[in-house]
Image: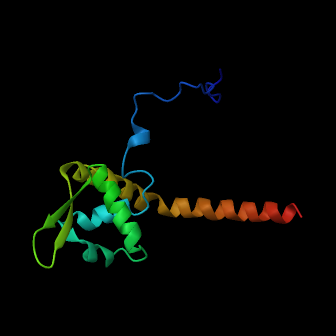
Amino acid sequence: MTPTESAPLTTDFFDPDCPVRTIPVLGGRKWAWKIMRCLEGGPRRFSELRVPLVGITAKVLAESLRAMESEGAVVRTEYDEHPPRVEYALTPLGRTLLGPMDAVCAWSRQNLAGLLEAREAYERDEAGRAVGAR
């Protein structure tokens, strides 16, 4: 095999013990990271979370919080008061995600210009191919 050739991919390429498919909030939840940032400073009420999360519906916020709670990243606390009060907070487990989130954000800041340039070049190439296909 030459240095530019890669070994063929096999069906056992991925480590079966790697939990990457089950990693909770790092994956497919669109609002999870923003919710976590809102909770980073301490517990918040549902209505407080809606303020910076412009564009999220109450239904999606509730679903996201419920999912994050089921994954152990967020805890929901109900207070026996009138009117009832509910707060959401990061769990110690949820807080462990803040460091990796910081790293991804730093990488994004450092590489945003290159990412945008690549995207624009790709879109120009795709538009050129579409015109050429006519």
Question: In the rendering, at what x and y percent does residue 86 appear?
Answer: 19, 69
User: Is 14 in front, or is 90?
Assistant: 90
Question: In the rendering, at what x and y percent does residue 40 appear?
Answer: 22, 63
View extreme (top): residue: 1
Q: Residue at x 89, y 64 (%)?
A: 134
In the rendered view, tell whether residue 42 sits above or below residue 5. Answer: below
Q: Residue at x 32, y 59 (%)?
A: 66
Question: In the rendering, at what x and y percent does residue 68 appear?
Answer: 32, 55
User: Is 6 in front, or is 23?
Assistant: 23
Q: How is the image coloured?
A: rainbow
Q: Residue at x 44, y 61 (%)?
A: 30
User: Is 80 in front, or is 60?
Assistant: 80
Q: Residue at x 68, y 63 (%)?
A: 123
Count up the numbered dots: 0
Q: Quadrant of residue 48?
A: bottom left
User: Image check: 125 left or right of 99?
Assistant: right
User: Image check: 26 left or right of 90?
Assistant: right
In the rendered view, tell whether residue 33 sits above or below residue 86. Answer: above
